[in-house]
Image: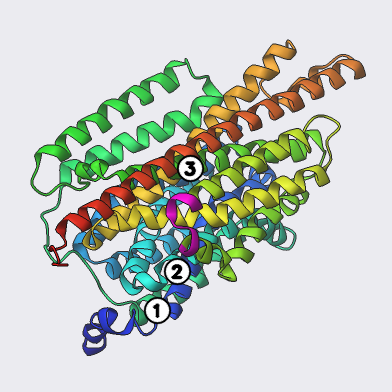
Amino acid sequence: MTATTAADQPAATTGGHPQRWLILGVICLAQLTVLLDNTVLSVAIPSLTSELHASTSDIQWMINAYSLVQSGLLLTAGNAADRYGRKKLLAAGLALFGLGSLAAGLAESTAQLIAARAGMGIGGALLMTTTLAVVMQIFDDSERVKAIALWATVGSLGFAAGPLIGGAILDHFWWGMIFLVNIPVAVIGLVAVLKLVPESKNPQGERPDLLGALLSTVGMTAAVYAIITGPEHGWTSTEVLLPAAIGVAVLTGFALWELRIPYPMLDMHFFRNQKFVGAVAGAILVMFGMGGSLFLLTQHLQFVLGYEPLEAGLRMAPLALTVVALNLTGVGPRIVMKLGTPLTVTVGMTLVAAGLGSIALIGGGADGTYWGMLLGLVLMGIGLAVSNPAMANAIMSAIPPEKAGVGAGVNGTLAEFGNGLGVAVLGAVLNARFAALVTVTATSLPAALAAAGSDAERAQISDAFASGLQTSQLVGAIAVFAGGLLAAALLKRAERTERKTAGDEQPAVAS
């Protein structure tokens, strides 16, 4: 009790919590486990199909149940952390994630595995919001950008390592081990959190916004569901339009409700803050380009260049390794401190756009090679290492410290939304271009190639698919570049407003 009380005190006088870097390591380990589970399941699909007799629909729900529940609960989880205590919710998230992993690893049917993945999504939502909120509490302004950069690095590492770790495990064990390996990490993380992490929460003790929590969860879940299922059912189908309409209507109701109550879960007046709006716009569009491009790249490497899933994962690793190298060496945070947020965002998102363009123009096409893609992957990695921490810090610094959990929930929700939107929009561009070049009834490239009647027809189909990939990657590059300019302009304008306000508040000094 005494240690916890003392731990809450020193931030103002010592530059942060005395064990802040050790705590950051624990937080990053917990978050890495959550992020791995976004991608690790992809390499287990053949095993699940044969051993659990899972259908294509079952596989989709095994993957989507996790991200759907997690994204739907992010805002609610962040608000609960602010109210009831970030340490408590972080510990609860680790416990739920560990129990969900145990249930998933021991599942004997597809229904059990889908339910377990949904339970893991609840734990994941608690972890994703509380980790960033705790970072904001234990680091002061002088070290916060570097800490957020390291926290953001884990996201890239999680993406790259998921298929690699999953493939290595499946080479030696049965599919359940990809979930059971989470348990020791969750136990170690839980013990470390209980022992090291100081408790923090909103000192005002605001009343819970139960209706707001319900509306945000239902609205986000419906919207994300529509985005996830769009490519499968078609964007004009009832299966997509109905949840999309429900999501828009419920989220509109959520915004109106939040504006009229005294203790809102998400203060809609944040959106009057130009710094917040600029960072929000940049975060969505970076994840739009990132999520969409990675969706396209995996298909390019496997369908056009002919690599197996594990080989494709290895060849995408340079992107994540570039992010990790720049942030671990402190280059990314130093750029933010030297250039300032607006210019950093401009540079970072321009590099991401250049990377996408390089992949399309140099590494794209049916005659493209992996080496032609490598430059683009490295450029994207540099751009993400520079821009992501700057925008996460801008979002969090635009929100009062006592609302850090909600800020982390907003940040996580934007990432999920931008990622899903990128896959949806760039995937639609790919399909439209593909359909314009060749007439096929199959819904995927492998099916179209299998249905082809001759080698010449198969070559024509492959060329059309490669051309569709190029077009969609260029659309992503343009969107990211334009988004970077927009976000930077809003952030620059917000900084001028802040300086003007600060100057007006200074007392006049006689000359």
Residue 408 in sight:
no
Which of marks 1 and 2 precedes in the sequence? 1
Query: Which amino acid type is marked by label 1?
Result: Arg
Residue 442 rendering spot, x and y as whole percentages: 70, 18
Residue nearest the viewer, comparing 184 with 135? 135
In primary-sequence order, the first of circles 3 and 2 is: 3
Q: What amino acid is labelled 2 in the image?
A: Ala
Q: Nearer the viewer, residue 168 or 400?
A: 400
Farthest residue in the left direction?
A: 262
Judging by the rendered image, the residue that carries numbered circle 2 is 147
Q: Which mark is residue 261?
A: none
Q: What residue occupies the far front of the structure in this picture?
A: 511
Q: CA distance from mark 3 to mark 2?
A: 40 Å
Q: Any mark on residue 20, and which?
A: 1
**Nearer the camera: disc 2 or disc 1:** 2
Query: Cα distance, mark 2 to mark 1?
Result: 9 Å
The secondary structure that dominates the magenta segment is: helix
| Residue 389 x, y percent position in the rendering | 47, 58
Q: Residue at x 30, y 34 (%)?
A: 219
Is 358 located above or below residue 382 in the figure? above
Magenta stretch in the rendered image = 337-344
Q: Residues within 10 Å of mark 2 (few under 14, many from 20)?
A: many
Say above or below: 454 vs 280: above
Q: Position of residue 46 (x, y in %)?
A: 69, 44
**Residue drawn at point x = 69 percent, y = 12 percent:** 436
Mark 2–mark 1 contact, CB under 8 Å?
yes
Residue placed most toward the observer, 43 or 102: 43
Q: Which residue is mark 3?
A: 111
Q: Marks 1 and 3, Cα distance to the nearest angstrom? A: 41 Å
Q: Earlier in the sequence, mark 1 or mark 3?
A: 1
